[in-house]
Image: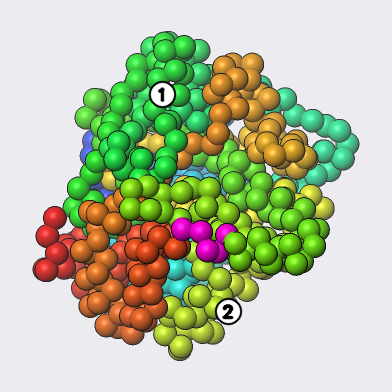
Amino acid sequence: MCGIAGTYRWPDGKAVTDRLTAVLAHRGPDAAGRYGHPAGDGEVQLGHRRLSIIDLSETGAQPMVSGGLALTYNGELYNAPELRAELEAAGVRFRGTSDTEVLLEAWRRWGTGCLPRLRGMFAFAVFDERTGELTLVRDQLGIKPLFLLRRGGGLVFSSELKALAAVTGGKLEVDHGALVASLLYYWVPDSRCAYREAEKLPPGTWLRLRPDGREERGRYWSLKEVAAEGRERALASEVPDLAAVVEESTRRHLMSDVPVATFLSGGLDSSYLTALAARDRPGISAYTIGFRAEDARFEAMPDDLRYARQVAARFGVDLHEIEIAPDVLDLLPRMTYHLDEPIGDPAAINTYLICSAAREAGVKVMLSGMGADELFAGYRKHLANVLALRYQRVPRPLRRGLSAAVDRLPVASARRGYRSVRFAKRFLSFADLPEETAFRRSYTMYDREELLALLHPDLAGTVDDVLTEHADVYEDNDLDDFVNRMCLGDARMFLPGLNLAYTDRSSMAASTEVRVPYVDVEVVRAAFALPGDRKIAGRQGKAVLKEAAASVLPREIVYRPKGLFSAPLRAWMSRDLAPLVREVVQDGELVRAGLLRREALRRMVAEDAAGQRDFSKHLWHVLTLEYWYRGAASGSGAPPGPPPSVTA
């Protein structure tokens, strides 16, 4: 896993590429390299920062140049052994054992035709010295990032947006549409970018640049098509053996020449992966988190730690426990910097701290259970939306009475929060709405009217654009299965926009590679070949995955209440971060710039403090957005500090 960057027909490309790779040093502290070559009336420059995982020798160094092709590559190919064998049978001779060399030779033999055959996570750039063409590629599901910026006939690309901002001198213009989307979702969708001039190469696509200025784009993999194929398989009763598919994916994801460990929250997804990994790697290490007792009690958080200990003991796993009692005033600006865009999920802090601890222990690679909830309908929102369909059959007067009663209940007292009340209020906020609107409202931060009340009136049209975009993506399918429609929407929006984004950026900030065995093309194919009533059975979410895991894990783990990979936000907001919240609401850059309305923020703070509504997540995201905007406005490229009047 590495950091890649480069320029194509860009002024002073050599110096720019060196600056890009310097910003990416944390992604690859083991080695650095650069390659240059003429390209038409300009030149190409490819940069690389290496985190050595497969083939630690110089034969795996990058950019890799061979026979007129040059490659800079960030990723892992889990089917590299099979591709290598096929290429060797065709007469290819390899110098080393890296998957980078396999990718280079696969490209030489098949060109873009090799892309549907790749199984892994990757973003790469390959230059053909003969034609002067540069081709950029991103993996099927958007696990690895690739940011682009164009000016004139030139282009610059990088694994991280902050590198592009740094080399342009902080002169990029903030995209207000992306900020509005960020407020709605608490992350920036993969279809948008926080800077107006920049863009993200879409998952499953390639972009070819020619020296005469022409461009060509192609799509080699489509989630929509995979879901449609899965529907046909389900209708034909071609039911996949999910346990075998997940086990095979996990085994492939263990491929490494350095130590591998796992995340172990004690929940189903990470416990299943850890148990499977322990079969192949007895004594494998795992890392788990706990919280200060007073924070967990205030948040009414489940005791995930005891389940993690139970799994570790049963499978002989070397468990490392990390208590998260962080100095959030220090971590918040640091994480905002590393996350590149305004992402308001505190799970990014957990990932960063776990990866930092693992790295200090000499671990470079970790397996995560990310993706299982999206693909197998494991989030509370999935079950809640199914239950909402039943709720809509309740007579309207009863629904109105229930809503009024729940609205009067507090979400917290001075000493503790009430999770059941929070969930009830959340459910009733969308239970009467049409399908797409209800699904959006079940996991986003605001409804349309709340968002309009928070933002400057000039952004009203942008709000409608963002909401329309969600509807367009969600409804772009021919599935007749409600549960799989939700899973497809998540796999196209929520997974790449939030979970894969923060996982990549927060782990690489700690110079650690995180692999996601559930977000594997074969697991995805299997997931969409399963009907929705096997994913949500009765009131049981992720039912089919639980059936698969039950042959390996104790039932107490498989069928326990859903755990949380989050943080005690209410405790932090009411204690550690309260002074910062007041400062940002009163005199933050977003308020002074007129983007957010001070009175709307004050109402949120007051209602949250009174315990009537839970706005802790909303306010946390306002803080992340404030820090990101402050850094973007300054153009410094450095993480901003807290306001002068706020002390830790």
The answer, for residue 52, to whether it is visible in the render is: no
Please state the horizontal and vertical placement of residue 543, each as a whole percent of the image. Answer: 68, 33
Residue at the spot of label 2:
464
Tell me whether circle 1 and circle 2 mark residues in contact (CB < 8 Å).
Answer: no
Mark 2, Cα crowd under 10 Å, few <14 / some 14-19 / many 20+, is some
Dominant secondary structure of the residues highlighted in magenta in the image? loop
The answer, for residue 326, to whether it is visible in the render is: yes
Q: Is residue 538 left or right of residue 236?
A: left
How is the model colour-coded?
Answer: rainbow
Q: Amino acid at mark 2?
A: Asp
Q: Quadrant of the C terminus?
A: bottom left
Q: CA distance from mark 1 to mark 2?
A: 45 Å
Q: Which residue, as the protein is rendered here, is positioned at the far right?
A: 236
Q: Secondary structure at mark 2?
A: helix
User: Which numbered mark, 1 or 2, is in the foreground of this view?
Assistant: 1
Q: Residue at x 42, y 13 (%)?
A: 313
Residue at the spot of label 1:
306
Q: Amino acid at mark 1?
A: Arg
Q: Is residue 20 left or right of residue 144?
A: left
Q: Which region shows up in magenta?
A: 406-410
Q: Quadrant of the N terminus?
A: top left
Look at the picture and state if 197 lies above or below 187: below
Please state the horizontal and vertical placement of residue 130, each as a whole percent of the image. Answer: 46, 53
